[in-house]
Image: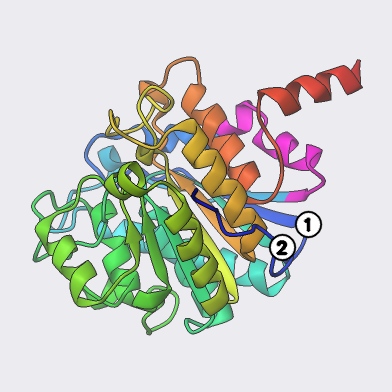
Amino acid sequence: MITIVQSVRISQIMSKNIKIIYVPIELGAKYGGTDKAPGVFKKLGFEQTLQGNGFTTEAQDIECKISNDLQPEPVDRPYVAEIINISEQSAALTKQAISDNQIVVAVGGDHTVDLGVFSGASSALGSEDIGLIYIDAHGDMNTPASSTSHNVHGMHLAALLGHGTDDMINVCQPKVKLKSENLLHIGASDLDQFEVDLMKSENIPNYSVNDILMNGLAPLTKMIYDLASRASSIWVSFDLDSIDQTLAPGVGIPNPGGLTYREIRLIASYVAARCNVVGIDIVECNPPQDVDDKTVKLGIEIATNLLGGSSNQYSQYMNKISAD
């Protein structure tokens, strides 16, 4: 019989005060649409959901230019100057919020959002003491030299690890933001060979979709437990394209073999129970591709669950009964 590691919280969430940063960026990929996500999160009551779980919220928007207003330069990293500009802004907001004892919740936008917010968190807390749980179907660990798509949303995690170009590596402050042993990559199903080789050469902890299918979630909970023991603070970066497309159709690259609802619920609740979550980013929601707002609704639920709150059909039903 498989036994999941006991989910007893080792350290409480640092506060009940949340700084929401809306980052409507769509420059990291070629398909567009992710800039619409923050507006739909607001419309569907994201802030009210968090408040209903006992959090106080303060929200701020970052103004992001769209690709139609810019030249796609340079060819190996289109729009990188504006991506770095946006990242510097989100990094500064994140660093200040964490210094003010707030949890940061960043709503993207494409996955380049993580470059800024994690850089800010790492700069506030120190790279020795922060871990990153990165849930994504893709590796996002290419460099300009290795990338075939040249999409910057596939390069930012490499930059956080210290690979690639100095302008991305040095966002917020000139240092590597993430130790390879403090990264836990979950849910990969599409990795480039460069990313496979990088994971092996740097011994990056990872647990793919195939690992889940073959071995279940018990080994993953042990990996989360171990990371939380090494790193006193945890950031979670959640790409909604890691989820099966039946649940999350509204993403840039729908995933026919992604994580199931039970898997993401268990992962989120276990992270909330075991980790000192100082911030999260929810990214790659693409509302023009969505069906009945189901991807946004699921994103709201995941974010709330990662913070130790509850947002699902049952809790919504009970809230309605209480209100009545």
Residue 311 position (above or below residue 168): above
Please name the residue shown 36% across and 59% down the image: 185
| Whether label 1 touches label 2, CB < 8 Å | yes
Please name the residue shown 44% across and 63% down the image: 116
> How far from the left and from the top, in percent, is residue 30?
21, 39
Going by the image, does 205 lie left or right of 312? Answer: left
Q: Label 1 vs label 2: CA separation?
A: 8 Å
> How far from the left and from the top, in percent, is residue 212?
36, 46
How would you rate the neighbour count of disc 2 (Cα within 10 Å): few for under 14, some for 14-19, many for 20 or more? Answer: many
| Label disc, if present, on residue 121 of the rendered structure | none
Q: Nearer the viewer, residue 223 or 134?
A: 223
Find out whether residue 56 is within the magenta segment.
Answer: yes
Let me know if residue 41 appears in the view. yes
Please name the residue shown 14% across and 67% down the image: 197
Task: Point out the stretch of residues depicted in magenta.
Answer: 40-57
Residue, disc 2: 13
**Amino acid found under the numbered disc labelled 1:** Lys
Q: For the residue labelled by badge 1, is the local secondary structure a helix, a strand or a loop?
A: loop
Find out whether residue 189 is within the magenta segment.
Answer: no
**Which is the main secondary structure of the residues drawn in magenta?**
helix
> How far from the left and from the top, in percent, is residue 126?
52, 83
| Label disc, if present, on residue 16 of the rendered structure | 1
